[in-house]
């Protein structure tokens, strides 16, 4: 299978991405996957720590880092992280739990917010899925990582959206696009890994991935 082969749906599908990249991402974010069956409050706290750990910067714990998980409530009957994960996928779940307010403050999760994040990732997919490979140096420092340095996960996601707008306005800026994908991978590892793979920056072979038993991304 060649590097340019489109082996999943041309439309954004979080569940297809989880099947294809589940083994890789679940190993890399093991601390999050281990607590997915638990409450959304616990999953959110683990996600926050995982994002900091995955950041390319040498981040010391910011003053606002939550030592006690802040409560997450919902209008719907979403009992725990595993249920939400299977319904909307890791990437949408991560954005929904990390956006809006800092991780040390309580969060009320709504269906509208998850729909909004899904629509945004759909736009990201449409821009990136057919983009040709480019050569660019990796810029690991931008407004997204600076917001994380200050313990502002919600501001980091806002800056991530702003960075995507710049990508749309500057389609020929290869360095900007790669910088966006690297920052996207902090919060949305499935879609970001796929798009980075299409840029030749991920070495895993999709054929060998499809033969793994870990179809849903839950580490055994």
Image (cartoon, rainbow, N blue to C red):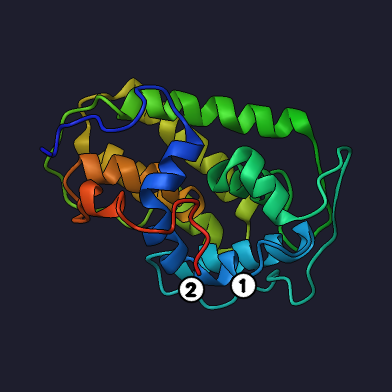
**Horizontal side, residue 56 vs residue 63: left or right:** left
Q: Residue at x 58, y 30 (%)?
A: 118
Q: Position of residue 84 (x, y in %)?
A: 70, 46
Q: Which residue is mark 2?
A: 59
Q: Quadrant of residue 167?
A: top left
Q: Position of residue 176 (x, y in %)?
A: 29, 39
Residues 24 and 168: in front is 24
- What separation in Å lies between label 1 and label 2 (alpha carbons)? 8 Å
Q: Quadrant of residue 102?
A: bottom right
Q: Under tag 1, what secondary structure? A: loop
Which labelled disc corresponds to residue 213?
none
**Horizontal side, residue 33 vs residue 190: left or right:** right
Q: Which residue is mark 1?
A: 62
Q: Position of residue 70 (x, y in %)?
A: 81, 63
Q: How many marks?
A: 2
Q: Are the two marked residues, 1 and 2, in contact with CB atoms closer than 8 angstroms?
A: yes
User: Considering the image in quadrants, where does the N terminus appear?
Assistant: top left
């Amino acid at each position: 299978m060649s590097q340019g082969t489109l082996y999943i749906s041309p439309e954004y599908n979080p569940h297809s991405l989880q099947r294809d990249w589940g083994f890789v991402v679940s190993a890399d974010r093991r601390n999050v996957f281990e607590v997915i069956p638990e409450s959304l409050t616990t999953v959110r706290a683990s996600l926050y720590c995982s994002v900091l750990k995955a950041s390319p910067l040498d981040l010391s714990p910011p003053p606002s880092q939550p030592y006690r998980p802040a409560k997450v409530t919902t209008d719907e009957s979403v009992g725990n992280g595993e249920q939400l994960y299977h319904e909307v996928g890791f990437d949408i779940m991560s954005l929904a739990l990390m956006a809006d307010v800092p991780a040390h403050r309580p969060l009320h999760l709504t269906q509208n917010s998850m729909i909004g994040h899904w629509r945004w990732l759909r736009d990201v997919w449409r821009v990136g899925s057919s983009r040709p490979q480019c050569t660019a140096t990796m810029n690991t420092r931008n407004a997204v990582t600076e917001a994380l340095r200050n313990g502002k996960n919600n501001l980091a996601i806002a800056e991530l959206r702003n960075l995507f707008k710049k990508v749309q306005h500057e389609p020929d800026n290869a360095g900007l696009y790669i910088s966006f994908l690297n920052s996207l991978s902090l919060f949305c590892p499935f879609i970001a890994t796929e798009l980075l793979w299409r840029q030749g920056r991920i070495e895993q072979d999709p054929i060998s991935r499809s033969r793994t038993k870990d179809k849903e991304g839950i580490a055994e």
